[in-house]
Image (cartoon, rainbow, N blue to C red):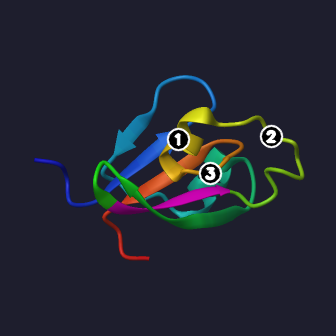
Amino acid sequence: MKPKNEVIYIPLVGEIHRSPNKPNLAQMQEFVLGYIEPVRRIRFEGRAATMIVNEEGRLKRMLDNDRASEIAGQPIVGPAIVFVGYKT
């Protein structure tokens, strides 16, 4: 059985990391390398989720994040965080 709430960290390279612990604002900003922006409500493994990205990722010309783009169903740049099961 999957945890009720889960946080998925999707870096540009390297392993995707899952955590049951919700990060604070500073931790989210550190991971996405700047100010945060919610992308939109998505589905992740059949569950309601929200993806967080760098607000200025395109302006900063961050690299494409193919794994996050596939999950979101739209182009995503830079590291991304997916909140699964949290009410937003």
Rounded to the nearest angstrom, the CA distance separating label 2 from label 1 is: 17 Å
* Residue 73 drawn at (x, y percent): 54, 50
The span picked out in magenta is 48-53
- Amino acid type at mark 1: Glu
Magenta residue check for 52: yes
Q: Residue furthest front?
A: 73
- Amino acid type at mark 3: Gln
* Tag shown at residue 74: 3
Describe the element under mark 2 as helix, strand or loop: loop
Count of residue discs: 3
* Horizontal side, residue 64 vs residue 15: left or right: right
Answer few, some or many: residues within 10 Å of disc 3's Cα (few below 14, many 20 plus, some between 14 and 19). few
Vertical arrangement, residue 61 with respect to residue 42, above or below: above
Give the position of the C terminus as an image quadrant: bottom left
Describe the element under mark 1 as helix, strand or loop: helix
Rounded to the nearest angstrom, the CA distance separating label 2 from label 3 is: 15 Å
The residue under label 1 is 70
Rounded to the nearest angstrom, the CA distance separating label 1 from label 3 is: 7 Å
State the residue at coordinates (73%, 47%).
Answer: 33
* Horizontal side, residue 43 vs residue 57: left or right: left
- Residue closest to the eye, 56 or 29: 56
Answer few, some or many: residues within 10 Å of disc 1's Cα (few below 14, many 20 plus, some between 14 and 19). few
Describe the element under mark 3 as helix, strand or loop: loop
* Tag shown at residue 62: 2
Of the two numbered discs 2 and 3 in the rendering, the one whose residue sits closer to the viewer? 3
* Horizontal side, residue 77 vs residue 67: left or right: right
Instruction: Name the main secondary structure of what is drawn in magenta.
Output: strand
